[in-house]
Protein backbone atom coordinates (compact mmCIF):
# COMPACT_ATOMS: atom_id res chain seq x y z
CA UNK A 1 0.00 0.00 0.00
CA UNK A 2 1.27 3.49 -0.79
CA UNK A 3 1.22 5.75 2.28
CA UNK A 4 -2.42 5.19 3.04
CA UNK A 5 -3.52 5.92 -0.51
CA UNK A 6 -5.07 3.74 -3.19
CA UNK A 7 -2.63 1.28 -4.80
CA UNK A 8 -3.99 1.73 -8.29
CA UNK A 9 -1.34 3.03 -10.69
CA UNK A 10 -2.64 5.63 -13.13
CA UNK A 11 -0.65 5.03 -16.31
CA UNK A 12 -1.44 8.36 -17.91
CA UNK A 13 -0.53 10.40 -14.85
CA UNK A 14 2.43 8.14 -13.99
CA UNK A 15 1.50 8.05 -10.33
CA UNK A 16 -0.72 6.19 -7.87
CA UNK A 17 -4.33 7.20 -7.31
CA UNK A 18 -4.59 9.71 -4.47
CA UNK A 19 -7.95 8.65 -3.07
CA UNK A 20 -8.07 6.98 0.33
CA UNK A 21 -9.18 3.36 0.49
CA UNK A 22 -11.76 2.27 3.06
CA UNK A 23 -10.14 0.67 6.10
CA UNK A 24 -8.65 -2.73 5.33
CA UNK A 25 -8.84 -2.15 1.56
CA UNK A 26 -5.96 -1.86 -0.87
CA UNK A 27 -7.77 0.31 -3.41
CA UNK A 28 -10.15 3.24 -3.16
CA UNK A 29 -13.86 2.51 -3.59
CA UNK A 30 -13.76 3.61 -7.24
CA UNK A 31 -10.87 1.32 -8.18
CA UNK A 32 -12.05 -1.55 -5.99
CA UNK A 33 -15.19 -1.52 -8.14
CA UNK A 34 -13.25 -1.10 -11.38
CA UNK A 35 -11.07 -4.10 -10.61
CA UNK A 36 -14.15 -6.16 -9.78
CA UNK A 37 -13.02 -6.86 -6.21
CA UNK A 38 -16.10 -7.98 -4.26
CA UNK A 39 -17.09 -5.79 -1.27
CA UNK A 40 -20.04 -5.70 1.13
CA UNK A 41 -21.56 -2.63 -0.50
CA UNK A 42 -22.61 -2.48 -4.12
CA UNK A 43 -21.34 0.32 -6.34
CA UNK A 44 -23.28 1.40 -9.40
CA UNK A 45 -22.51 3.65 -12.37
CA UNK A 46 -23.51 7.26 -11.61
CA UNK A 47 -26.68 8.18 -13.58
CA UNK A 48 -25.37 11.73 -14.16
CA UNK A 49 -21.89 10.90 -15.35
CA UNK A 50 -21.15 7.36 -16.52
CA UNK A 51 -17.43 7.92 -16.02
CA UNK A 52 -17.62 7.24 -12.30
CA UNK A 53 -19.44 5.07 -9.81
CA UNK A 54 -21.05 5.53 -6.42
CA UNK A 55 -22.49 3.40 -3.62
CA UNK A 56 -25.98 2.20 -4.44
CA UNK A 57 -27.18 2.76 -0.88
CA UNK A 58 -25.91 6.38 -0.99
CA UNK A 59 -27.26 7.28 -4.41
CA UNK A 60 -29.45 10.19 -3.27
CA UNK A 61 -26.60 11.78 -1.37
CA UNK A 62 -24.20 11.26 -4.25
CA UNK A 63 -26.58 12.72 -6.86
CA UNK A 64 -26.93 15.88 -4.81
CA UNK A 65 -23.16 16.34 -4.61
CA UNK A 66 -22.56 15.31 -8.19
CA UNK A 67 -25.21 17.66 -9.63
CA UNK A 68 -23.65 20.54 -7.77
CA UNK A 69 -20.18 19.70 -9.00
CA UNK A 70 -21.28 19.35 -12.61
CA UNK A 71 -23.69 22.28 -12.56
CA UNK A 72 -26.56 19.99 -13.59
CA UNK A 73 -29.95 21.41 -12.66
CA UNK A 74 -32.54 19.02 -11.33
CA UNK A 75 -35.43 18.24 -13.70
CA UNK A 76 -37.90 20.41 -11.78
CA UNK A 77 -35.69 23.52 -11.93
CA UNK A 78 -36.99 26.04 -14.51
CA UNK A 79 -34.79 29.15 -14.61
CA UNK A 80 -36.79 32.39 -14.28
CA UNK A 81 -40.09 30.61 -13.55
CA UNK A 82 -41.12 33.31 -11.08
CA UNK A 83 -40.06 36.32 -13.11
CA UNK A 84 -43.28 36.96 -15.04
CA UNK A 85 -43.73 36.86 -18.80
CA UNK A 86 -40.75 38.94 -19.85
CA UNK A 87 -38.81 38.01 -22.97
CA UNK A 88 -36.11 35.51 -22.27
CA UNK A 89 -33.49 38.06 -23.29
CA UNK A 90 -34.75 40.51 -20.70
CA UNK A 91 -34.30 38.03 -17.88
CA UNK A 92 -30.58 38.48 -17.78
CA UNK A 93 -30.60 42.25 -18.26
CA UNK A 94 -29.32 43.87 -15.10
CA UNK A 95 -29.46 47.56 -14.29
CA UNK A 96 -27.62 49.47 -11.70
CA UNK A 97 -29.48 52.27 -9.97
CA UNK A 98 -26.64 54.55 -11.06
CA UNK A 99 -27.41 53.92 -14.75
CA UNK A 100 -30.96 55.24 -14.45
CA UNK A 101 -31.51 59.01 -14.76
CA UNK A 102 -32.72 60.56 -11.49
CA UNK A 103 -35.82 61.97 -13.21
CA UNK A 104 -36.87 58.50 -14.44
CA UNK A 105 -36.36 57.12 -10.96
CA UNK A 106 -38.51 59.88 -9.43
CA UNK A 107 -41.27 59.14 -11.93
CA UNK A 108 -41.10 55.45 -11.08
CA UNK A 109 -41.38 56.16 -7.35
CA UNK A 110 -44.38 58.45 -7.97
CA UNK A 111 -46.00 55.77 -10.10
CA UNK A 112 -45.53 53.10 -7.43
CA UNK A 113 -46.90 55.35 -4.70
CA UNK A 114 -49.89 56.28 -6.86
CA UNK A 115 -50.70 52.63 -7.65
CA UNK A 116 -50.28 51.74 -4.01
CA UNK A 117 -52.71 54.43 -2.89
CA UNK A 118 -55.22 53.49 -5.57
CA UNK A 119 -55.19 49.73 -5.24
CA UNK A 120 -53.64 48.53 -2.01
CA UNK A 121 -55.84 48.81 1.00
CA UNK A 122 -54.38 47.05 4.00
CA UNK A 123 -55.81 48.34 7.24
CA UNK A 124 -53.37 48.40 10.14
CA UNK A 125 -54.57 46.00 12.78
CA UNK A 126 -52.18 45.51 15.66
CA UNK A 127 -53.11 42.50 17.75
CA UNK A 128 -51.37 40.77 20.62
CA UNK A 129 -51.17 37.33 22.12
CA UNK A 130 -50.98 36.00 25.65
CA UNK A 131 -47.96 33.80 24.84
CA UNK A 132 -45.82 36.95 24.87
CA UNK A 133 -47.51 38.66 27.80
CA UNK A 134 -44.65 38.14 30.23
CA UNK A 135 -42.04 39.16 27.67
CA UNK A 136 -43.82 42.38 26.84
CA UNK A 137 -43.82 43.37 30.50
CA UNK A 138 -40.11 42.72 30.93
CA UNK A 139 -38.60 46.08 31.84
CA UNK A 140 -35.04 44.97 31.16
CA UNK A 141 -35.65 44.88 27.40
CA UNK A 142 -34.70 47.86 25.28
CA UNK A 143 -36.95 49.53 22.72
CA UNK A 144 -35.85 47.35 19.75
CA UNK A 145 -36.38 44.11 21.69
CA UNK A 146 -39.86 45.20 22.78
CA UNK A 147 -40.74 46.36 19.26
CA UNK A 148 -39.68 42.96 17.94
CA UNK A 149 -41.83 41.15 20.50
CA UNK A 150 -44.83 43.39 19.87
CA UNK A 151 -44.56 42.57 16.20
CA UNK A 152 -44.40 38.86 16.91
CA UNK A 153 -47.28 39.04 19.37
CA UNK A 154 -49.33 40.78 16.68
CA UNK A 155 -48.46 38.17 14.04
CA UNK A 156 -49.50 35.38 16.41
CA UNK A 157 -52.64 37.34 17.30
CA UNK A 158 -53.49 37.35 13.61
CA UNK A 159 -52.81 33.62 13.31
CA UNK A 160 -55.14 33.06 16.26
CA UNK A 161 -57.82 35.30 14.76
CA UNK A 162 -57.67 33.32 11.52
CA UNK A 163 -58.05 30.07 13.46
CA UNK A 164 -54.58 28.85 12.53
CA UNK A 165 -53.35 28.12 16.05
CA UNK A 166 -54.70 24.59 16.23
CA UNK A 167 -53.47 21.03 16.15
CA UNK A 168 -51.75 19.29 13.23
CA UNK A 169 -50.41 22.48 11.67
CA UNK A 170 -47.07 22.96 9.95
CA UNK A 171 -45.50 26.40 10.31
CA UNK A 172 -42.78 27.45 7.89
CA UNK A 173 -40.75 30.47 9.01
CA UNK A 174 -38.88 31.99 6.09
CA UNK A 175 -35.76 33.96 6.95
CA UNK A 176 -36.08 32.45 10.40
CA UNK A 177 -32.77 33.56 11.91
CA UNK A 178 -32.92 32.40 15.50
CA UNK A 179 -36.41 31.04 14.97
CA UNK A 180 -37.99 33.50 17.41
CA UNK A 181 -41.39 33.58 15.77
CA UNK A 182 -41.57 29.76 15.62
CA UNK A 183 -40.57 29.68 19.27
CA UNK A 184 -43.53 31.85 20.30
CA UNK A 185 -45.94 30.08 17.99
CA UNK A 186 -44.83 26.87 19.64
CA UNK A 187 -45.60 28.38 23.01
CA UNK A 188 -49.01 29.55 21.78
CA UNK A 189 -49.63 26.02 20.46
CA UNK A 190 -48.61 24.18 23.62
CA UNK A 191 -51.93 22.43 23.89
CA UNK A 192 -52.07 21.45 20.23
CA UNK A 193 -50.63 18.10 19.20
CA UNK A 194 -48.82 17.20 16.01
CA UNK A 195 -47.56 20.64 15.02
CA UNK A 196 -44.42 20.92 12.93
CA UNK A 197 -42.03 23.85 12.65
CA UNK A 198 -39.79 24.34 9.64
CA UNK A 199 -37.16 27.06 9.90
CA UNK A 200 -35.71 28.30 6.63
CA UNK A 201 -32.77 30.66 6.30
CA UNK A 202 -30.03 31.23 3.77
CA UNK A 203 -27.38 31.78 6.41
CA UNK A 204 -26.70 29.70 9.45
CA UNK A 205 -27.56 31.04 12.82
CA UNK A 206 -25.63 29.80 15.80
CA UNK A 207 -28.03 30.46 18.62
CA UNK A 208 -31.47 29.17 17.93
CA UNK A 209 -34.12 29.71 20.54
CA UNK A 210 -36.42 27.01 21.80
CA UNK A 211 -36.62 23.39 20.97
CA UNK A 212 -38.34 22.04 17.90
CA UNK A 213 -39.22 18.35 18.09
ZN1 LIG B 1 -8.00 4.71 -6.55
ZN1 LIG C 1 -21.82 11.21 -9.99
Image (tube, rainbow, N blue to C red):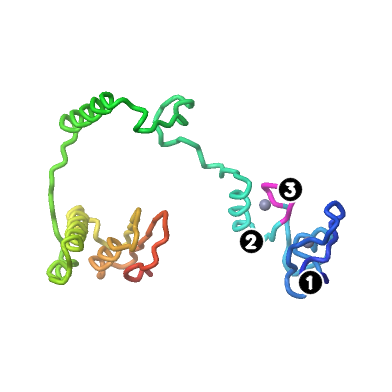
Question: Is residue 10 left or right of 95 when viewed as pictured?
Answer: right
| Residue at left offset 19%, top offset 35% | 120
Does 191 appear above or below 168? below
Dominant secondary structure (helix, strand or loop) of the stretch shown in magenta: loop
Density class for disc 1 (Cα within 10 Å; few <14, some 14-19, many ≥20) is few
Q: Is mark 2 within 8 Å of ligand 2?
A: no
Range covered by the magenta-colored residues: 46-53
Q: Is residue 51 magenta?
A: yes
Residue beneath disc 3:
50
Point out residue 165 in the picture as x, y percentages from the top left corner: 24, 60
Residue beneath disc 1:
3
Q: Label 1: state its secondary structure.
A: loop
Viewer-nearest of discs 1 and 3: 1
Which disc is residue 103 wearing? Answer: none
Say whether disc 2 or disc 3 marks the residue closer to the N-terminus: 3
Does 170 appear above or below 122? below
Q: Quadrant of residue 39?
A: bottom right
Q: Label 3: state its secondary structure.
A: loop
Residues under numbered marks 1 and 2 in contact, where contact means CB atoms less than 8 Å apart: no
Viewer-nearest of discs 1 and 2: 1
Point out residue 180 in the picture as x, y percentages from the top left corner: 29, 63
Point out residue 135 in the picture as x, y percentages from the top left corner: 17, 69
Density class for disc 3 (Cα within 10 Å; few <14, some 14-19, many ≥20) is few
| Residue at left offset 56%, top offset 42% | 75
Disc 1 to disc 2, C-alpha distance: 27 Å
Q: Label 2: state its secondary structure.
A: helix
Disc 1 to disc 3, C-alpha distance: 29 Å
Residue beneath disc 2:
58
Question: Is residue 67 left or right of 36 when viewed as pictured?
Answer: left
Amino acid sequence: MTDGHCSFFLEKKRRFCRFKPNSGQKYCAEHTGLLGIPTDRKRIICPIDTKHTCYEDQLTKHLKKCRKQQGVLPAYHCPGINSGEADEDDLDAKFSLLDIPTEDLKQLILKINKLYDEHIKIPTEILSHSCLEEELCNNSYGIPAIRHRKQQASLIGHLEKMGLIKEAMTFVELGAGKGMLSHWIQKASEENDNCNYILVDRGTCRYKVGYYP
